[in-house]
Image (tube, rainbow, N blue to C red):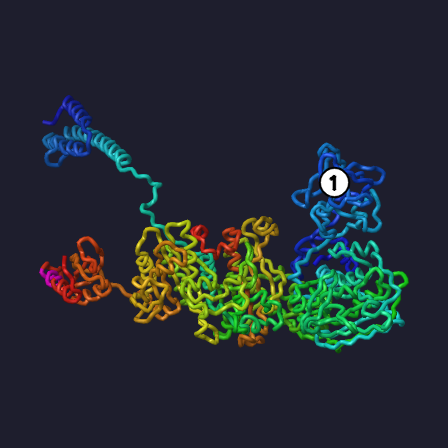
Amino acid sequence: MLISKNWLQEFVDISKIAPQEIAKRLTLSTVEVEGVKVFGEGLEKVVVGVVKSVEKHSNADKLNVCQVEVGKKTLNIVCGGSNVRPGMKVALAQIGAKVRWHGQGDLVELKPVEIRGVASEGMICASEEIGLLEMFTKKEEKEILDLSTVALTKAGLPLATALCLDDVIFEIDNKSLSHRPDLWGHYGIAREVATLLKKSIRSYQTKIVPKGTGVKLTVNVEDKKLCPRYMGIALENITVQPSPVWLQTRLRAVGIRPINNLVDITNYVMVEIGQPMHAFDADRLHKSIKALKHENSIVVRRAKDGERLKALYGKEYTLTKGMLLIAGREKPLAIAGVMGGEESGVTEATKTIIFESANFDPVSIRKTSTTLGLRSESSARFEKGLSPERAELALKKAIELTLALVPGARVASPLIDKKVPLKKSAVINLALEDIKKKLGVSIPATEILSILLGLGFDVSKKKDVLRVTVPLWRAKDVTIPEDVMEEIVRIYGYAKIPATLPTFPITPPPANPLRVLEHRVREFLAYEHGFTEVYNYSFLSPDLVTRLGLEVSAHLELANPLAKDRPLLRRTLKGGLLENVESNFHRYAKVKLFEIGRTYLGETLVDSLPDQPTMLALAYAESGVNTPFFVVSQALKGSLSRVGIEIDFEKSLDIGSLYHPGRSAYVTLDGQKVGSIGELHPTVAKRMGIDARVAIAEIALTALLPHLKEKTSYAPIPAFPAVVRDIAFVVSKTVVHADVVKALKLIDPLIVKVTLFDIFSGGNISTDKKSMAYHIVYESREKTLAAADVDAVHARVIKKLQEQFGAEIR
Amino acid sequence: MPINKEEYTKLQQIFADELERVSELVALEALEQTYFSRASGSFTALMKELGTLSPEERKVRGQELNQLKNELMSQLAAKRADLEAKTLGDIAESEAIDVTQPLLPAKEPGHIHPISQVQAILEDLFTSMGFMVLDGPELEDDYHNFEALNYRFNHPARDSQDTFYIKNHSDWLMRTHTSPVQIRGLKKYGAPLRAIVPGRCFRNESTDARHEHTFYQLEGLAVDKVISVAHMKGVLEAVAKCLYGNKTEVRMRPKFYPFVEPGVNGEVTCFLCHGDGCHVCKHTGWMEIFGAGMVHPNVLKAGGIDSKKYTGFAFGLGLTRLVMLKYGIEDVRHLQSGDMRFLEQF
């Protein structure tokens, strides 16, 4: 929203206050001022010019050579404007003027130049070249600023004078206004400025509405919930013409294009006090004018499904059931609070008008405007929830302006006011002690009083309790004591609040074991095992899910996905990781990734919401590596072992089609399945577009929590030396390492460590067999072992291997 | 008989010649032994002969011999230093390595995602201040995400433009902020309570360099008997100083959030220009990094807390935004791209 400093000046004396100061104060206490624009800055050498003649440039297709009169002189100007024509009034930058080429970059001083052989003594400007784009918007790229419709311009007049460009504009962030309907007009902002600067604000006065007859007007509000108040009045003997310059300037300054005096008046009132209004042409309310002359009836009702309305600017809208309409006897006239209809709007021929000033339900307005994709200055204000009391003030102001600005205009009907009883002002009691406690600072009562009174609250003080009456225009956002405190503290200034640290007991906070586990596992995976952490989205495409061989229907789905192709909530992190492997594998020969994140399982409810376990997943692929499995199994086992969790891998054939059937396993912990690990099934790898063996694993971190163990033991350093014996043997390929280790360790307490150091198959070993080689460490706590001691146990080792595993010792 | 003057000069000369011929430490050691070995050194023998002289003579000759011994010993030491320096000079060449060469084969460490890193720093900071770290569901219900947080049933934030809803479960949605955990935390732990909630949030908005539908927040909550706006400012200032240095200031401006009253928008002095204005802070000198406010009585009530007895403040730091500011990341989409060219930099 744009706010004019001159306009504010009408209500509060800020003539001596720097605009930047006002902007800063507003930003720190009320709303965010995003920019301050000083109009007319640097326009000293820009004047109004009248184009006398336009001739084609002999040496350039798109250029014209114009004679432009500027007061007593006539200048030769080369111009590329697409709309230049003889008789046009233009903004002429003379030699020495400073302009911004195409509205961009720094200001450039104009010098006499020759353009393709023709001398140019200045430049005819486009609006953005002299910083007036907001005031004069453009329809096409090469359009120059046309001043012909601006009243009172004559050749040679400085542009700043011609356009009354002595204003400063504050650009306010609309988002910061969303809960303050009272600030959607100059008067509301003026009240804040006055309070902030400790100045008084002029009260908003309107004249008494004269009595009128001649036009019969009836209003029937069918839906009082959606329209708590509807006021209307007819005025006749209207002449529609351009507004006076001051009014045009005011509107232009805040970015509203002047249209004609009646429309301008409704816009003026809206921008001044925030209440949108509408003007109907009374003679166009009904199809048959004569039959119903002087018999105007307006109905406020909900639309029927499929009703159509051509809105202002010509676009036709199909309405749906429930949207609020302003209708005549036969047809819809306007979409209530959103936009008027073209067929009932004011035209140059309008003689009699009906002013509408009403109050509409904010939710209904927002729904309608969103559904239709039609947003307007009016809907923007109504959807914030205006006070019904505002409607009357606006209507009176509009009547006053019409009678003053439109010669001969007169009131032609009684003032109609259909309303549900207006709510009374709320009263809030507030103890000074509570204010001090909640704000953490002691603000003198006199200052509190002056802040609240300045903002329009009524306050009386009884002992140490304030009785605060909320003004009607704040009824929406001030309802509890805390709301009043906010008013006090923001005007008083957050900067003046001391920064104080609260006193808390020094007890350490209870730990979050899952978070500790996440962070630790992250560090071990990254810094010990070389895996890199990724974050993937929670949303997957059905296509990916299908490629993984999973059921689309098992997934929870977004009702309104942003990307239509990714509506599914992930049940596994593997899909995202495999996509990462695929995309990185184009650039890297080695990809080692992991992710920690939630999955969403609709079939299990926890506290009436889907179970959302925190998962850990890993993926690894490297060109030329034929068994990536062990890198992932080592990383998973190793990093979990660091936090006291010893996992096992149990091969199983029912593990699912994602995995390679011969290279996959369940991850188990104390016999309980907590995840899975394996190489990707070659078919799936192909579907994923990965031309390499990929190993993946996924476990539920949440399931590990009960098993977290801190290391709390230590074995004394052995007093006697250990003896290491190596053994190599050939066994069937079905023999697994874990079983060998387990069996050997059980043979004798002297065996303290069994380490695999080689696996070999091929060569002269038959294809269904493999060679395994182990270091076996023998150690005694009581004595230095003699060779005979070790030999005896080692013989049992050999025997065990032969008997249990059918090993041939090499 | 002890040696005379002439023999004395001769011995000096012989020693000098022999020393001159020595070129290795071993030979030097042998030479030293020849002269000064306790048992069989030739110089030691001369010293022993002093005992046969009269006391007066012994005194004079003794001084002379000692002087000579010191002289020879210092020549030996000088020679030793020379030889040692020469040997060390040799290994500098013979055992030289290229110290700039990396370990081969290379061991490449992995990388932790920048959001995890910044989150861990903040979790440490807040736990050191006595805050618990809480978690809550990412797929939330309407009650915790909106209603309990004082969003009226018709609040625009509830529009599906901003919120992802779950198909066939009109009550379920992807949480739009970490604030639902305020309610869950209060219900579970009661007051007093100090907690933070770092986590993933979702907004249904189109993605571009500055907007993401998936982002990270860090929620904070402190509820106790006398918590004031001044306390909120104090804690947030402490956080800002920890993040950006001791001179950092906090600026608060009014901002509306349904679940706090008063509500503020928090800015801190720009860490790059320290307030002078630069591209990072869009020439304002301030960086907007959090929203905050005093917990709304309705929220305390929804959390089962008596708002007459307890007050509190809550804040939400944009974790994703902090990470982008910290590293100068220009496009938020990098964070969830899984692109190793990005991730390997952290």
In the shown orientation, is residue A90 left or right of residue A636? right
Mark 1 surroundings: few (<14), some (14-19) or many (≥20) residues within 10 A = many
| Residue A456 picture location, percent across and down | 73, 68
Name the residue furthest right. A408
Q: Quadrant of residue A251?
A: bottom right
Q: Residue at x 55, y 55 (%)?
A: B208
Q: Mark 1 = which residue? A: A79
In the shown orientation, is residue A275 left or right of residue B270? right
| Residue B20 picture location, percent across and down | 20, 26
| Residue B304 seen in the current view | yes
Image quadrant occupied by the N terminus of chain A = bottom right
Q: Quadrant of residue A6?
A: bottom right
| Residue B232 picture location, percent across and down | 56, 64
Subunit bearing disc 1: A
* Looking at the image, residue A357 lies above or below residue A579: below
User: In terms of depth relative to the viewer, which is nearer, A256 or A714?
Assistant: A256
User: In terms of depth relative to the viewer, which is nearer, A449 or A686?
Assistant: A686
Q: Is residue A791 magenta?
A: yes
In the shown orientation, is residue A448 left or right of residue B166? right
User: In terms of depth relative to the viewer, which is nearer, A247 or B116?
Assistant: A247
* Looking at the image, residue A320 lies above or below residue A9: below
| Residue A672 picture location, percent across and down | 32, 71
Q: Amino acid at mark 1?
A: Cys
Q: Quadrant of residue B265?
A: bottom right
The number of numbered badges drawn on the structure is: 1
| Residue A484 seen in the current view | no
Image quadrant occupied by the C terminus of chain A = bottom left
Q: What segment carries the magenta color?
A: A788-794
Q: Is residue A308 magenta?
A: no
